[in-house]
Image (tube, grey):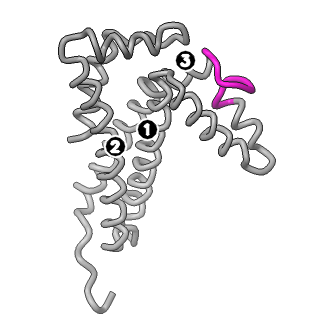
């Protein structure tokens, strides 16, 4: 349900959003202040993204408690974990798109954390940012990943996840023998 809200509101936001350093913040302000229903659409997108993260995380914790990771449901479990990671990716990449101070500095901190990985951290940081600092290239990369790569990945993984659930069924409540 939250993903459906994300798709619809995201497509509506694309009509006005400009993914450039010079225009991103102004286009978000235009959507929020001057476009009829724009504030509602933007807030629905923002709040349902948080709700989606909460729901996917809650579902994963519940599935873990039900031991849904055990044979024969390993692929279902792995696809669910990957869906959670993609959902986090949506949140991370989408947070920069308004291009305001809070988004800029939060992304600076987030990419710096990725940059702290031993041996490959600096490489990861430069790949994420498109250089040493956040720039127009970073915004373009995050926008592209947010609207093309992550949606394609999540749709494919939802397909795999649902196929496995239909094929194997949902896990049952663990009994005392388990």
The residues tagged by marks 3 and 2 sit, at their Cα atoms, a distance apart of 23 Å
Question: Residue 16: percent from the left, percent from the top?
Answer: 33, 9
Residue 116 in percent (x, y) is at: 73, 47
Q: Give the residue number, with chain letter if any, for mark 3.
A: 140
| Outermost residue toward the bottom in this view | 177
Q: Residues within 10 Å of mark 2 (few under 14, many from 20)?
A: some
Of the two numbered discs 1 and 3 on the same chain, state the one appearing first in sequence: 1
Q: Which residue is drawn at 63% across and 34% down?
A: 108
Q: Are marks 2 and 1 in contact (CB under 8 Å)?
A: yes
Q: In which quarter of the image is residue 63?
A: bottom left
Residue designated by label 1: 91
Stretch of the chain drawn in magenta: 127-136
Picture layout, residue 23 above or below residue 164: above
Residue in view at x 38 percent, y 31 percent: 151
Question: In percent of the image, x 50 and y 21: which residue is there?
Answer: 99
Q: Is residue 133 magenta?
A: yes
In the rendered image, residue 80, in percent from the top left (x then y), is placed at 38, 54
């Amino acid at each position: 349900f939250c993903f459906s809200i994300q798709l619809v509101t995201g497509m509506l936001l694309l009509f006005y959003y400009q993914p450039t350093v010079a225009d991103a913040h102004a286009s978000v302000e235009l959507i929020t202040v001057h476009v009829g229903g724009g504030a509602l659409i933007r807030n629905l997108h923002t709040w349902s993204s948080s709700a989606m993260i909460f729901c996917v995380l809650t579902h994963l914790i519940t599935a873990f408690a039900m031991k849904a990771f055990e044979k024969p449901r390993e692929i279902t479990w792995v696809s669910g974990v990957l869906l959670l990671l993609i959902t986090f990716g949506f949140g991370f990449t989408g947070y920069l798109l308004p291009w305001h101070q809070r988004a800029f500095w939060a992304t600076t901190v987030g990419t710096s954390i990725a940059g702290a990985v031993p041996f490959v951290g600096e490489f990861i940081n430069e790949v994420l940012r498109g250089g040493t600092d956040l720039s127009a290239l970073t915004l373009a990369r995050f926008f592209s990943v947010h609207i093309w790569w992550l949606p394609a990945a999540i749709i494919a993984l939802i397909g795999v996840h649902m196929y496995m659930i239909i094929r194997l069924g949902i896990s049952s409540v663990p009994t005392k023998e388990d």
